[in-house]
Image (tube, helix red, strand yellow):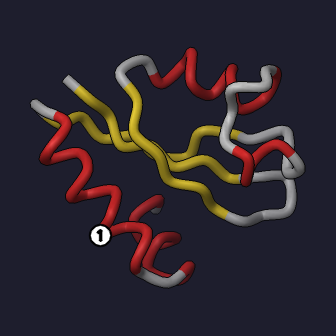
Amino acid sequence: MRFVYMVRCSDETLYTGIAKDVDKRISDHNTSKVGAKYTKSRRPVKLVRKKKFKDRIMASKEEYRIKRIGKEKKEELIH
C-alpha cells in the first residue's frame, strides 16, 4: 500500500510525493537530511492531502498527474 501526499510549504507552495508511511515522511521533510531537496529550504511543511493506493504503479500515476496540473487545480484537490 502506498500513499500520494501533498504538503504545503512555508512559502505556500505545494509539494507532492509518494510514501508508505506518510507521518514518517512528513517528519523527514521537516527535520532530516533525507527530505526532498525542494522542501529543505521551505520548512516547515504541513500535510494537506493524502490518498491511499493499492500499489506503487497506481500511486506513481496519480503523483505524475498531480505534478502536471497547476496550483489552482491542486488547491481544488485539497478542498
The residue at the point 32 percent across, 34 percent down is: 3
The residue at the point 69 percent across, 32 percent down is: 35
- Name the one closer to the observer, 17 or 51: 17
The residue at the point 86 percent across, 42 percent down is: 43
- Name the one closer to the observer, 77 or 13: 13
Q: Amino acid at mark 1?
A: Arg
Residue 55 in percent (x, y) is at: 13, 32
Q: Is residue 42 above or below residue 79?
A: above
2 sits to left or right of 25: left
31 sits to left or right of 70: right
Q: Is residue 1 above or below residue 12?
A: above
The quarter of the displayed image where residue 59 is located? top left
User: Does dot 1 land on a helix, a strand or a loop?
Assistant: helix
Q: Is residue 18 above or below residue 19?
A: below
Q: Quadrant of the N terminus?
A: top left
Q: Is residue 43 above or below residue 32?
A: below
The residue at the point 69 percent across, 39 percent down is: 46
The quarter of the displayed image where residue 20 is located? top left
How many residues crowd mark 1 within 10 Å: few (<14), some (14–19), many (20+)? few
Residue 13 in percent (x, y) is at: 72, 65
User: Disc count in the image?
Assistant: 1
Pointer 1 residue: 65
